């Protein structure tokens, strides 16, 4: 479906989305593409799944429900419309500002702000579906194929038993800087992996995706847990390693279906080195 056709369809329904016009593309990837749309001073985001998304993305209806709950809590921009597809089409309000960059987490107060946003999410006790990480691991390993992928999935399941032991609450599961928008009132976008899970895994994803240095990790945990609180260091370390397994499997599976971008190739090489060195 073209973005023009998606906007025409959105305008023909009862969702108050008549008169939207495309402004420019925001993102183009192997799994989804998004565009900025406008109507007067209002701004919206139109997201359309690519054919490959069906094999990688979780249930879009579950995502829409979690995103809606987060928006009601002031943690995400409001989602307005979902067509399950295929291809799935999502329309949300546009979050003011731009996406964060990894290097900006070192700026004064920045990672503390994100820690507070995640704590708000986890303490809000929002509804959601339980995380089925085992199913995702099995799916990635099956698509990647080969003995190495199966070994990674088995190792990840063992790590899950050791580290995902916290209270189950709605987690974003991909709170990397690129999924945080705005400064005055930062919001989380792209809720496709949101599910009920262990909040510690959100912290692990944030720490491990860009391999944040120890000083930033300390700032994050102090801001999230409190300066005097006891940080579950062992579980957090295991959760970070679990994320490496998940991320590596996802990249291996994607590489079978579509060429990796240069950034993804670098990520795969980096995470593979880490997994081959248990001391890192």
Image (spheres, grey):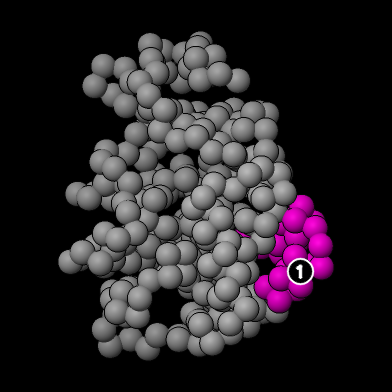
Residue 194 seen: no
Q: Residue at x 59, y 48 (%)?
A: 260
Residue drawn at the location 56% of the way across and 18% of the way down: 2
Q: Position of residue 112 (x, y in %)?
A: 26, 67
In the picture, measured across the screen, residue 35 lies left or right of residue 146, that is: left
In screen coordinates, is 41 left or right of 101?
A: left
Is 143 part of what is drawn in magenta?
A: yes
Magenta highlight: main SS: helix
Residue annotated with mark 1: 148
State left or right for residue 267 relative to residue 56: left
Q: Is residue 158 visible?
A: yes
Q: Quadrant of residue 88?
A: top right
Instruction: Look at the image and give the residue range highlighted in magenta.
Output: 130-157
The location of residue 141, given as percent across then percent down, is 75, 60
At numbered mark 1, what does the secondary structure look like: helix, strand or loop? helix
Name which quarter of the figure residue 19 lies in. Answer: top left
Viewport quadrant of the N terminus: top right
Mark 1, Cα crowd under 10 Å, few <14 / some 14-19 / many 20+, is few
The vertical placement of 130 against 83, above or below, is below
* Residue at point 58%, 82% (across, down): 277
The residue at 35%/76% (across/down) is 213
């Amino acid at each position: 479906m073209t973005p023009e056709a998606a906007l025409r369809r959105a305008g023909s329904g009862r969702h108050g989305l008549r008169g939207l016009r495309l402004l420019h593309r925001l993102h183009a990837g192997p799994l989804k593409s998004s565009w900025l749309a406008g109507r007067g001073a209002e701004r919206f985001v139109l997201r359309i799944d690519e054919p490959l998304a069906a094999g990688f993305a979780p249930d879009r209806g579950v995502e829409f429900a979690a995103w809606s709950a987060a928006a009601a809590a002031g943690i995400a921009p409001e989602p307005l419309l979902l067509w399950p597809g295929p291809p799935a089409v999502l329309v949300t309000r546009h979050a003011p500002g731009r996406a964060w960059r990894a290097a900006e987490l070192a700026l004064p107060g920045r990672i503390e702000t994100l820690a507070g946003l995640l704590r708000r999410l986890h303490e809000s006790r929002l509804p959601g579906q339980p995380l089925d990480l085992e199913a995702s691991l099995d799916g990635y390993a099956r698509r990647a194929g080969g003995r190495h992928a199966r070994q990674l999935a088995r190792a990840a399941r063992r790590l899950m038993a050791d580290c995902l032991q916290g209270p189950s609450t709605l987690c974003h599961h991909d709170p990397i800087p690129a999924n945080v928008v705005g400064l005055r009132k930062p919001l989380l976008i792209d809720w496709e992996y949101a599910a009920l899970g262990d909040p510690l895994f959100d912290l692990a994803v944030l720490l491990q995706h860009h391999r944040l240095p120890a000083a930033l990790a300390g700032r994050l945990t102090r801001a999230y847990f409190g300066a005097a609180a006891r940080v579950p260091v062992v579980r957090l370390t295991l959760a970070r390693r679990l994320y490496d397994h998940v991320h590596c499997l996802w990249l291996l599976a994607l590489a079978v279906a579509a060429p990796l971008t240069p950034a993804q190739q670098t990520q795969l090489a980096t995470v593979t080195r880490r997994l081959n060195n248990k001391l890192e």
